[in-house]
Image: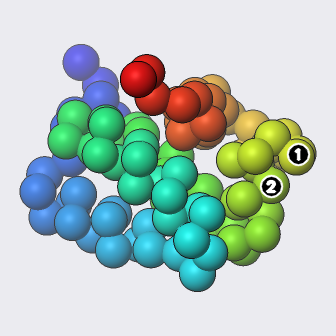
Amino acid sequence: MDELDDRLTPVEYSKLQWRCRRGLLENDLFIQRYLDQYGSAMTVREARAMYALMDLSDNDLLDLLLRRKEAEAPLDTPDVLKLLERMRTPLPQ
């Protein structure tokens, strides 16, 4: 197993949660829904993809989450694209 597939430690996850705080409520809703569903099992690989998204401005992130635009280099990696797809997908009722 690759170290990137290791789960985050509680401290790493806490730091990620803090970094995911955004200025737009809409982004927070997407992010919190994702973290509620998948956060406890997040891997280092997924966290790196999340950190890459968190480096975007709020408006650019929202455009990606709402599919108003698609990820471009350097964000168009398999890990970021997978994360975006999971964040965009509504939870089953």
Q: Which mark is residue 78?
A: none
* Residue lying at the far left of the rendered structure: 10
Q: Which mark is residue 69?
A: 1
- Position of residue 58 relative to residue 52, above or below, is below
Q: Secondary structure at mark 2?
A: helix
Kind of residue indicated by mark 1: Lys
Asked whether residue 48 is in view, the answer is no
Quadrant hosting residue 58: bottom right
Q: Quadrant of the C terminus?
A: top left
Q: Which mark is residue 63?
A: 2
Kind of residue indicated by mark 2: Asp
Q: CA distance from mark 2 to mark 1?
A: 6 Å
Q: Position of residue 67 (x, y in %)?
A: 81, 41
In screen coordinates, is 17 left or right of 92? Answer: left
Quadrant hosting residue 1: top left
Residue in view at x 33 percent, y 74 percent: 18
Give the colour scheme shown: rainbow
